[in-house]
Image (cartoon, rainbow, N blue to C red):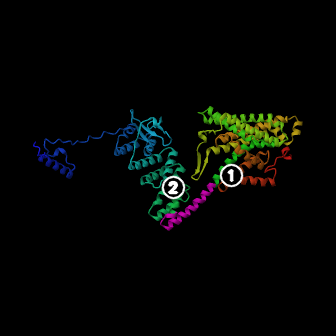
Amino acid sequence: MPPHTRPTPHRPLLWQSLILLLLIQLHPTVQADDLPVADSIATDVTVEAPAAPLPATFDGLLLALPDADFDIRAEIIQRLSATQHPRLLPVLEALVEGQLNSTTEAPKKIVIVAAEGDDPAATDALTGQALGPSSALSLDMISVNNALRGELRDLIAGLQLASPDKANRLAAAQRLIASDEISPEQLALVKTQLLKESDGGVKDLLTSVAAASALASESPADRRAAIHALENSLYPEVRAKLQNLAENDADDGVKNTAKAALVAIDEKLSLNHAAENIFFGLSLGSVLLLSAIGLAITFGVMGVINMAHGELMMLGAYTTYVLQQLMPNSIGASLLLSIPAAFLVSGLVGIAIERGVIRHLYGRPLETLLATFGISLILQQAVRSVFSPLNRQVASPDWMSGSLAINPALAITYNRLFIFGFALLVFFILLVAIKRTTLGLKLRAVAQNRAMARAVGVRADWVDALTFGLGSGIAGVAGVALSQLTNVGPNLGQAYIIDSFMVVVFGGVGNLWGTLVAALSLGVANKFLEPFAGAVLAKILILGFIILFIQKRPRGLFPQKGRAAEA
């Protein structure tokens, strides 16, 4: 080729290429084989092979998810939902929350990564088997787009609403009532489930969900009808939606209806709040009863102001902690065993204190107070030396975890409910022991007239020791109960010793019924005062009330008869 010339394209090939492109644009369905092209043109047009058929099994479909595009993933999700596999619901929930991953190394696994933790745990999506920390695996997240996310939420809601497990149905209904908008598909699922729902609580919640969906209706009449259907609902999400209507709705009739419904709901909420305060007050009172009942016995019979009573409770709590460390796989059994163990440990320590110190100080209350205060400091330091000053946590068994939901505005925690029942059980066992046993008879004799009891052969010194041991043992049992409500530490007993003395003085020294009434009434009063005055000021007000009360009734609500009263 001469240097002054330049190559020109082959004109027939150029024209044929232009005609080919024009025909493809005008007729996209025209096949390449139907077009006359020159033999010299190398056609690179490839026909896509038909997609491989999707697996039929749950595990096969799961393994096909990572390599599929969003359209194929939508089909896989539909086929997964048709399998009704036991692991279907957690897999779909993990997928919609971005917690479903696939391993990049063979053999491929589908993994669910926990939502929380610095190094969240991984579990096998197919079997639920723990796989250890997620950082030990090489993972790729299986993502979904907005369209798939909406389909997944509808599928999950349908699966949960149709679940045979009441807890799953209730959780699904609670999720729907809290959502800002309910899709028509979800509303259809709710109405279908309402027709066959047998549980009253779930049915009421689903009814509220269906009614709440009508609050967004364009018709004011429909919105007013929905408000009337929800005027007895105590769910906070429903109240928030009614509040929004009362403030922002364009129709005055809807606003007024919503305001009237809010007034009715607030009245019911106030009643439930009062019931909650009563329960928490009785719960606090049961703790005060356990901590004060032993003090009432020792103070009533022996006239001893035991400032180490709180530390005896602390010993009972640490006994619970030690047994739980020895039986880590049997939390429930260790808690039950800790009750007699704490009674023995604190009771023996109490007898040792009485035999070693207190029996030399009878008749000298100030010296007794100072001596027991010094013993309390010794016990605190001994615990710090053995267990360290750090607080220890005692786990609660499964049957004490969770709460009993009376309605959406009122729930009773099982641990406080059990402790309340336990306190009453201890009280009545002690009452029967004092009224029906030989030790109880001698204890009452010494309390009423020590000299006469000695004259008839009662060894008053041993009765004093056993009485002090009994009161100390009950303090240890109180420590077991406290370990289920708070952390166990060296200062645990200090938070209850003053309250215990207030209960004893208010109820009547040495009177068990007075201790019961005083503990429960002070607990309830404290819980009603706390919302208005705060925790510290509430205690100050109660202390002031007791000071004024004993000015009028120095011997308490139920005064004791006998030596202690005469003294």
Callout 2, which amino acid? Ser
- Direction from residue 22 to residue 510 in the image, left or right: right
Q: Position of residue 378 (x, y in %)?
A: 73, 37
> Which label was assigned to residue 208?
2
Residue 436: in sight, yes or no?
Answer: yes
- Direction from residue 453 to residue 214 in the image, left or right: left
Q: Is residue 186 above or below residue 474?
A: below
Residue neighbourhood size for the residue with mark 1, other residues' Cα within 10 Å, grouped as few (<14), some (14–19), many (≥20): few
The stretch of residues the image draws in magenta is: 246-273
Could you tell me which residue is drawn at 48 percent across and 43 percent down? Answer: 115
1 and 2 marks in contact (CB < 8 Å): no
Looking at the image, which is closer to me, 378 or 267?
378
- Direction from residue 410 to residue 501 in the image, left or right: right
Looking at the image, which is closer to me, 515 or 192?
515
Most distant residue in the bottom direction: 252
- Residue at the disc numbered 1: 536
Does dot 2 land on a helix, a strand or a loop? Answer: helix
Quarter of the figure with the N terminus:
top left
Any magenta on residue 254?
A: yes
Q: Position of residue 194 (x, y in %)?
A: 48, 52
Camera-near label (1 vs 2) is 1
Residue neighbourhood size for the residue with mark 2, other residues' Cα within 10 Å, grouped as few (<14), some (14–19), many (≥20): many
Q: Position of residue 196 (x, y in %)?
A: 48, 49
Q: Position of residue 554 (x, y in %)?
A: 81, 51
Residue 336: in sight, yes or no?
Answer: no
- Tell me which label, 1 or 2, sits earlier in the chain: 2
Any magenta on residue 428?
A: no
